[in-house]
Amino acid sequence: GLDDEVKVSFCFSGDTRESYKPFTIMDAVRLQRPDFFLYLGDTIYADRNGTARQLPEFWGKYRSNRDDPWLQRCLCETSLYVAWDDHEIEDNYLPGCPFAGMGRKAFLDYWPIRRSAVDATRIYRSFRWGKAMELFILDARQYRDFKSKTMLGKAQKEWLLNALAGSQTTFKFIATTVPMSGGGSDRWDGFPGEREEIFQFIHEKKIRG
């Protein structure tokens, strides 16, 4: 229940490119026996080792990765939450990409993400584990708008800020598939105003954890 005192452990990683197989790190995740594994984007590389442009080709990328026995064992024994990043579509994918819809459909076909009744394309979401923690999984790709200087888009940003302010858990984890710093327009450094707005909101609302 929401008021349960629970102990939670989780692992996170990402970037399973075909040429990286075997994905032996998945055994390290599995053997930790986490409550869940946060698969933090680039679950396939649609733009490497043969480029996917049609839906069956995107599906093929997922099937190829699922052939890996280390990944199979981890997925069979470990609960998971999945985010997406650019390589599910192409390197540094931006809205307007002509095959983004196919890549998103393949992603949603192959990962256990409950669809929003209001917006079937929505990937950002949150999960609560009793009083201990709440996990906020962002979509850092399909709502980007450089003219409006936003990575998250208006609706997602409002959802995040309101949900953070309303969360009663001890710890709040925000999962973003792109680094918060480190240089380059494809990271949060490319959207410094929005990043500062989020940090300032957390500070002003005295959101802890």
Image (cartoon, rainbow, N blue to C red):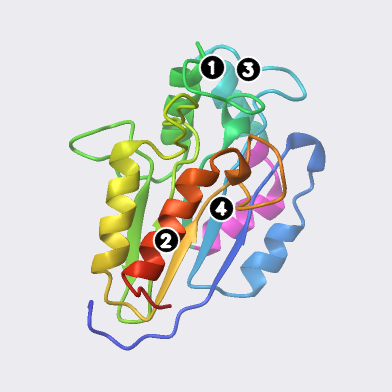
Q: Mark 2 = which residue?
A: 200
Residue shown at the point (42%, 40%) measured from the top left: 152
Mark 3 burial class by Cα count in 10 Å: few <14, some 14-19, many 20+: many
Residue at the spot x=57%, y=23% of the render? 58
Residue plotted at (69% across, 17% down): 51
Please, what secondary structure does the residue beneath circle 4 have?
A: strand
Which callout, 3 or 4, points at the residue further toward the start of the chain?
4
The x, y position of residue 157, in whole percent, is 34, 46
Q: Residues within 10 Å of mark 2 (few under 14, many from 20)?
A: few
Chain-order first, disc 2 or disc 4? 4
Q: Is 128 rendered above or below residue 194?
A: below
Task: Please state which amino acid type lies under the numbered disc 3.
Answer: Ala
Instruction: Answer with mark 2 or mark 1, whichever residue precedes in sequence.
Output: 1
Q: Residue furthest bottom?
A: 5
Q: Quadrant location of residue 42? A: top right
Reading the image, the residue beneath label 3 is 52
For the residues bearing labels 2 and 4, Cβ distance under 8 angstroms:
no
Please report the bounds of the magenta region as a residue range. Answer: 65-78
Residue 124 locus on image (x, y percent): 37, 45
Amino acid type, mark 2 = Gln
- The rendered magenta stretch, by its main secondary structure, is classed as helix
Please tell me whether mark 1 or mark 3 is closer to you in this view.
3
Q: Residue type at mark 1? A: Pro
> Label 2 vs label 4: CA separation?
28 Å
- Measured in 3D between alpha carbons, the distance from the residue under mark 1 to the one under mark 4, in whole angstroms, is 23 Å
Q: Secondary structure at mark 3?
A: loop
Real-space Cα distance between discs 3 and 2? 40 Å
Q: Nearer the viewer, mark 3 or mark 2?
A: 2
Residue 56, labelled with which disc?
1
Under circle 2, the secondary element is helix
Distance between mark 2 and mark 1 Cα atoms: 44 Å
Residue that label 4 marks: 39
